[in-house]
Structure formats: C-alpha cells, structure tokens
C-alpha cells in the first residue's frame, strides 16, 4: 500500500529514530524483478479541504512537480479531479493515478460532501466487476482504477476531528484503505501534536471508523507494522510537504526553510540535517526512492551470494584439508607396512643366503670326502692287484 510511496516527506513525532525501510524492499527478489519489468500501477485518493496541502504532499511523495492549478474555494459542490501520470525513476515505471477532492469542506451545507467520493470508489469497483464478468476478459491491458489508498488529510487544528471528517471516513472505511494524515504538521508543536493524535485516534475508535492496518503476517515487516498500527503512537501520520528546494550543505533538497532551520525529507537518518538554530527532524521521509531500495535489495542479494560463496569455499577448503590429512595418515601407515615387510624380506634373504652357504660348504666337503674315498679305493684296488 504505502510501500509505493517515493520520497515521502512525512514524520510523526519529531526526533524519533528511523525505523528503516519496509515494503518494496521486503519482497522476494524474483517478485521485485517481475514487478520492475511489468511496471507498477498505483491509485491514490486524496480527501481533504481545499488548500490543506494535498497536491504538495503528492509532489513531495513522488518527487515530482506536477504543476497543479490552485483550486478555488467557491465550488457549489464537491468534485473530484482525476489525473494519471506515467512516472519513471531509472528502470522503475509507475502509472500513478491521483484522485483529489475539489471544493471539499467549502460549502455551507456539508451533509452530502462525502457522496461524490463514495460514488467514485463504487464506480471503480463496478468497472472492475464488469470487466471480470466479461466472457473474454483482458486484464493485461485493463487499467485497474480501484483505489489502493485513501490519504485523508486532517486539518492541523490541534483540537479534534470535524464532523465532515467523521462522516466521510465512516462512509468509505469499508471500501478503501484509509490512512489518516495530519496535514501541515509543521504548524503544530510537538506536545500538541501528540495530544492531537491521541484525540483523533480515540474519536476514530469511538465512532467505529476502520483505518488501514499495516499487515503483520510478514515476519520481516511485522515489528514495524505493529508499531505503525499502535494507537496513540504513530497514527495518524503527521506530514509536511514542500515544493521548495532548499540548500542543505552543498546539496539542494526538498524542504521548508524557517528562520530557525530547515525541515528536510530524507531517507538516511545518519544524514539528518540540522541547520540554522537546529531543528533536527528525524524520521522524515522514511520511504526511499524505488531505485535506491531496488539497488539496496540487489546489493543485499549480491552480498548474500558472496557470503554463501565464501562459506562454500571455506567448507570446501576444510574438506580438502581433512582429506589431505587422511591421505597423509594412510600414506604413513602404508610406508611403515612397506618398511616392515622390507625388513622381514631382508631377514628372510639373509637366512636363505646363510643356508645356501652352509649347503655349498657341505657339498664341497662331500666332494672332498668323495675324492678322498675314491683315491683310497683306487689304492686299495692297486694293492690287491699287486698282491
Ligand atoms: P491542496 O489544495 O490541498 O492541493 O493544497 P496545496 O498542495 O495546493 O497547498 C496549499 C498551500 O499550502 C501551498 O501554499 C503550500 O505551499 C502550503 N503547504 C502545503 N503543504 C504544507 C505543509 O506541510 N506545511 C506548510 N506550512 N504549508 C504547506
């Protein structure tokens, strides 16, 4: 829902720590890639009095300069201004439809002021239903104009909600996601703002008005969503919009310049700017640009891949080392076995050699004895003959 918002110039309580990114960056990598290819379509309904800062906030959110003509306070009826913009930031395409109330709260009789809003919301549901009922539906080309979010701008009176606010919200809360905003929140002091928020929330609860609940089923965003849903805490969001570019350090940024400092919308808390007499506005604009988030997600994925690769390398090296040690031990064992066998064989050879030598000596002795006996035999024979 709000995840689409780019460069939101929004804060709830001054000097809070930044909660980090959520939404787009929490989507799975493949889903992000597919969404980037297909482009996004987002329909916002802005309901609020004339001059409350609707156009300025949209420009601040999407970092655009949509040059909207200032509305008059003299319309006899409430109307709606529908504008569709094709926005592109790097490779992210966004078809943005902004529906703004015109003349809201300007009539003396405000009883039916909510009706055009309700009619418009219903008409978009009807159009979608008609498309769905067609035998041959073509949702690929169909521009789904159903409202994704209704930003309800509350006047920064610091007092309470007006009956028109309650009446309108009551009539649309079952049809759209209402995100209540305290407009021009820079005009209220910190204490008043906190009290005003609590008062608004208690009025919404006592009148049974349902506002958008940030989803808590996704564990990556659950904690943040819970803190956003927490009544008397962050809601309704206090917002500040600006079309002005002010110089902060060496850079030009969107912000509001005051005698005591600059109010600047930023993504990175570490870069919060205090200037002049120092108005430190933490947690302003916690929605980064799509591209930044996409790049951050890519970088995170890349880092994870690198980490996993490194881990695999380490594991592989470990296994190689283990195998090497096992091989070395086996080699040592074999070597010892070989040495032992060699020794045994040498001893055997020496023994055999000794036996052979003894046998040879015996043979020689035998031949000697044979020769002596033959000589003796010959002598005996000769002696016998002589006789
Ligand atoms: P819209 O009729 O609701 O669309 O109101 P605009 O966006 O045209 O704003 C009306 C005037 O309010 C302009 O002069 C803006 O500069 C001023 N404005 C818008 N947002 C803020 C804000 O957050 N704070 C302050 N102080 N002024 C704002």
Image (cartoon, helix red, strand yellow):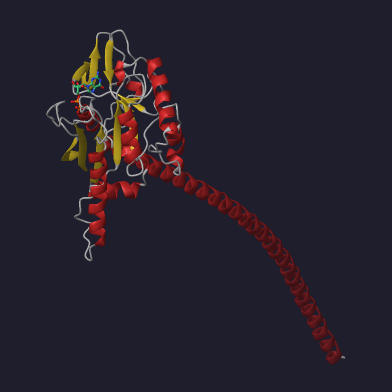
* 235 or 281, nearer to the observer: 235
* Residue 81 image-quadrant placement: top left
- Image quarter of the C terminus: bottom right
* 328 or 282, nearer to the observer: 282
**Residue 91 visible:** no
* Residue 338 image-quadrant placement: bottom right
In the rendered view, does 270 fall on the left or right side of 374?
left
Residue drawn at (27%, 50%) of the image: 125
Residue drawn at (38%, 31%) of the image: 20
Label tally? 0
Residue 41 in the image, given as x and y percentages of width and height: 24, 45
Outermost residue on the front side: it is 109
Residue drawn at (81%, 81%) of the image: 373
Residue 74 in the image, given as x and y percentages of width and height: 14, 27
Q: Please tell me whether residue 79 is drawn above or below residue 123 in the rendered image.
A: above
- Image quarter of the N terminus: top left
Residue 233 in the image, given as x and y percentages of width and height: 44, 26
Residue 197 in the image, given as x and y percentages of width and height: 40, 24
Outermost residue on the right side: it is 387
**Residue 34 visible:** yes
Quarter of the displayed picture in which ligand 1 can be seen: top left
């Amino acid at each position: 829902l709000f995840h689409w918002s780019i460069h939101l110039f929004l804060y709830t309580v001054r000097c809070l720590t930044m909660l980090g990114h959520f939404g787009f960056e929490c989507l799975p990598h493949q889903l992000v890639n597919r969404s980037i290819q297909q482009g996004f379509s987002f329909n916002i309904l802005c309901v609020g009095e004339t001059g409350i800062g609707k156009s300025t906030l949209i420009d601040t959110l999407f970092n655009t300069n949509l040059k909207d003509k200032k509305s008059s306070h003299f319309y006899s009826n409430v109307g709606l201004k529908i504008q569709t913009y094709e926005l592109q930031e790097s490779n992210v395409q966004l078809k943005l439809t902004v529906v703004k109330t015109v003349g809201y709260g300007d009539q003396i009789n405000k009883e039916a002021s909510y009706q055009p809003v309700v009619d418009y919301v219903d008409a978009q549901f009807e159009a979608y239903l008609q498309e769905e009922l067609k035998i041959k539906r073509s949702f690929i080309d169909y521009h789904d104009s159903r409202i994704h979010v209704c930003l309800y701008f509350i006047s920064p009176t610091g007092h309470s909600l007006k009956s028109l606010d309650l009446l309108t919200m009551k009539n649309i809360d079952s049809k759209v996601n209402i995100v209540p905003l305290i407009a021009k929140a820079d005009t209220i002091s910190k204490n008043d703002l906190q009290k005003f928020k609590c008062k608004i929330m208690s009025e919404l609860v006592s009148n049974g008005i349902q506002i958008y609940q940030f989803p808590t089923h996704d564990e990556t965003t659950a904690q943040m969503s819970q803190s956003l849903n927490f009544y008397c805490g962050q809601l309704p969001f206090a917002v500040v919009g600006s079309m002005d570019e002010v110089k902060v350090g060496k850079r030009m940024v969107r912000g509001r310049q005051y005698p005591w400092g600059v109010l600047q919308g930023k993504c990175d808390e570490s870069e919060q700017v205090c200037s002049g007499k120092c108005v430190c506005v933490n947690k302003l604009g916690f929605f980064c640009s799509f591209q930044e988030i996409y790049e951050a997600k890519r970088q995170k994925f890349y880092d994870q891949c690198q980490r996993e690769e490194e881990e695999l390398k380490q594991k592989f090296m470990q296994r190689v080392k283990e195998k090497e040690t096992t091989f070395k031990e086996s080699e040592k064992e074999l070597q010892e076995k070989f040495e032992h066998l060699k020794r045994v064989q040498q001893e055997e050879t020496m023994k055999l050699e000794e036996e052979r030598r003894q046998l040879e000596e015996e043979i020689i002795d035998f031949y000697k004895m044979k020769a002596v006996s033959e000589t003796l035999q010959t002598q005996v024979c000769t002696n016998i003959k002589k006789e």
